[in-house]
Image (tube, rainbow, N blue to C red):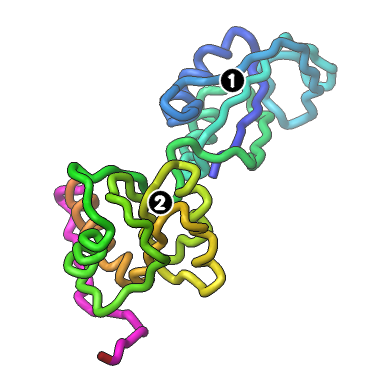
Amino acid sequence: MLKKLYTYIPIAYATKVRDAIFNAGGGAIGNYIECSFLTEGEGSFKATEGTNPHVGEIGQRHYEKEQKLEVIFEVWKEKEILNALIKNHPYEEVAYEVIALQNNNQNIGSGLMGELQNELPEEDLLDLLKAKFGLKMLRFTPLLGKKVKKIAICGGAGSFLTSAAIAAGAQFFITGDVKYHEFFDADNKLVLADIGHWESEQFTIELLTEVLQQKFPTFAVLKTAVKTNPVQYWS
């Protein structure tokens, strides 16, 4: 999720505050960093008794040339960014606004696309899925009689991405929890394979463990060995 910060800074301090926000992680859009927008205007305020204004006199309306700074940031960085803003802004009371955005984060999405090193017949790919995921069964739409190179994958319940997989040129879409009528969405444009919800996510614990160990080498990572799949198969 993305948010946007608006704040108002006296011109002499605009660079300092903007740099502090960038250093805290603000201003990243896709593969671009330190993105912002500045507009110049005039702010006004009147300091009351008990305040300690950076500029202006208590009891007198003050006008100050300011710049309005706009910066996008990821929601989890909000606390650090606001701390950087308040710490580096000269005003005793910092005026700012934070709003939620509907923009999609360009670096985050659902599912993966990939290509096999060598094309495989559809039947061979089904056998490979059964072996690698330890499947007792899997469901799939009619085979198209083509060799497979480009594959789309979404763990869990990913049938909502079938049209996106088709649009991306996938020949095979692997996911779980596909309902009866959702199989028709394949429309003979790819093979939609349902390998099971738990089965498609079973390696997540190992992947997360590996990431945590790499990112935090001094952190003791404990992982469960309990299988929580509620679905059983009779064979």
- Which quarter of the picture shows residue 41? top right
How far, Cα to Cα, is label 1 from label 2? Answer: 45 Å
Residue 31 shows in this picture? yes
Residue type at mark 1: give it. Answer: Pro
Residue type at mark 2: give it. Answer: Gly
Residue topped by disc 1: 90
Q: Earlier in the sequence, mark 1 or mark 2?
A: 1
Residue 90 in the image: above or below residue 95: above
Q: Position of residue 161 (x, y in %)?
A: 49, 54
The residue sitting at 40% across, 65% down in the picture is 142
Marks 2 and 1: in contact by CB < 8 Å? no
User: Which residue is nearer to you in this view: 218 or 224?
Assistant: 224
Q: Position of residue 202 (x, y in %)?
A: 27, 68
Quadrant assignment for the N terminus: top right
Q: Is residue 84 left or right of residue 93?
A: left
| Helix, strand or loop for the magenta stretch, by majority | loop
* Numbered tag placed on residue 137 in the rendering: none
Residue topped by disc 2: 111
Residue 64 in the image: above or below residue 135: above
Q: Position of residue 40 (x, y in %)?
A: 71, 10
Q: Which residues are magenta?
A: 216-234
Residue count near mark 2 (Cα–Cα under 10 Å), binned few <14, some 14–19, many ≥20 = some
In the rendered image, residue 203 lying in the magenta stretch gets the answer no
Q: Position of residue 175 (x, y in %)?
A: 39, 62
User: Which residue is nearer to you in this view: 50 or 197?
Assistant: 197
User: Which residue is nearer to you in this view: 75 or 43?
Assistant: 75
Residue 203 shows in this picture? no
- Which quarter of the picture shows residue 123? bottom left
Q: Residue furthest front?
A: 145
Assign a secondary structure to mark 1: loop
